[in-house]
Image (cartoon, rainbow, N blue to C red):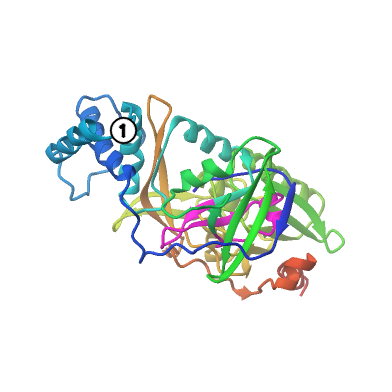
Amino acid sequence: MQNDQTPNNTTPHHVPAPVQVPSKARKAPFHIGYILFGLALFALGLFVGQGKINFLGQQYENSSSLPASLDYSQLNSLYTTLRTNYDGTLTTKQIIDGLKHGMATSTKDPYTEYMSATEATDFQSSLQGQITGIGAQLALDDDSNIIVQSPLAGSPAEAAGLRAKDIIAAIDGKSTYGMTVNDAVTKIRGKKGTKLVLGIVRNGKENLSFTITRDVIKIPTVVTKTLSDGQIGYLQVSQFSDDTDELVQKAAATFKADGVKKIILDLRDNPGGEVTTAVNLSSLWLSPGDVVVSQRRGTKTTDTENAGNVNTLQGMKTVVLINAGSASASEITALALRDHGAATLIGETSYGKGVVQQLFPFSDGSSLKVTVAKWYSPKGTNINKIGIKPDKEVKLTEDDYKNGTDPQLTAAEDFLNN
């Protein structure tokens, strides 16, 4: 998953677009990418064998059925044939990069991905809420379509009308079929002030086209206000970034000082981020030591995160708003609060990302983001590919989107006031 964040300078065009929905049934044409993958695999084996690539970070017990080493003889034959016969220019770097991207892609896990040095830098910037792009978190669905996981709050993507689960079928007229998330992110990002056109397929049938102007922005991860004449504190967290902990703790302290007794935590279209930040946010409502989330590899629990000592909002009647764009770390928070009886969930079923990634950096600045475990709520629930069903379902209609009305927020206020 990756971000493309930019401010509100957009021109939406809700007209049919000449796009085609990618499908598992269609076979991709054989092209040089497959060859590069094979060659890169061969090259990576040599580099690992020579100790030139080191995997950093926590190491897990090897539970894979893969052999300790691979037979590269067929790849060597392919390399020799390609080098001798290919009518074009190839570099060693192309081959190595092809391997690294291809090896990660071979897992068929949409969350495991290799990032070049440039891509890794962009990813770290996204965790800090600083990016150039359109403000949409992208992912792959089960059919390998590039989709909008969630449009970020205050972004051009949100202003243009992009929604969670929208399929990005074309970028500037070019089909996204066969693209990785990194490919799509690279094409969507660009020079400030330039425009791009996205061909969108919505609900599997509606073709739309959106023209959006790129820009650079740092989107605030936390927005607060009071509702119902100061009786309800509204806390919107758009993603879990480096500055989120400090901002939410300040907001919680302000709410308590102002005599607020009830809270709306808005996690709609929050694509997630750092798990530690989600744990710290949850801790505001929980008792010290309460389980927030645990991680398992197979049936073995490898890690458990517990609530800390800052429980400023504990005991306050709370609603958490979720929707199809609420994913990963935001789902961890929502489930932890519900499992401990600290909050009621209102809105729509969440995205359903119940796996954990770890980032392994390399000496050249590149990184491998790899799925290392599944996460479970305090009551042992994993919601991967399922999502969280809210306690009270309230949907947004087309008229709500067009008119800017928010029945989900209204439902949360009504619930807290009754």
Residue 156 magenta-drawn?
Answer: yes
Please give left or right for residue 26 compared with residue 21 in the image.
left
Q: Does any portion of residue 129 appear in the rendered image? A: no
Which residue is nearer to you in this view: 140 or 372?
140
The magenta stretch spans residue 241: no
Say which amino acid is labelled 1.
Ile
In this image, 104 relative to 176: left or right? Answer: left
Give how far across and how far down residue 124 sits, in percent: 53, 35
> What residue does disc 1 label?
95
Q: In this view, does 256 lie above or below 69?
A: below
Residue at the spot x=69%, y=42% of the render? 219
Quadrant of residue 125 in the image?
A: top right
Q: In which quarter of the image is the C terminus?
A: bottom right
Numbered range of the magenta stretch: 138-167
Residue at the far right in the pictured view: 229
Viewer can see residue 181: yes
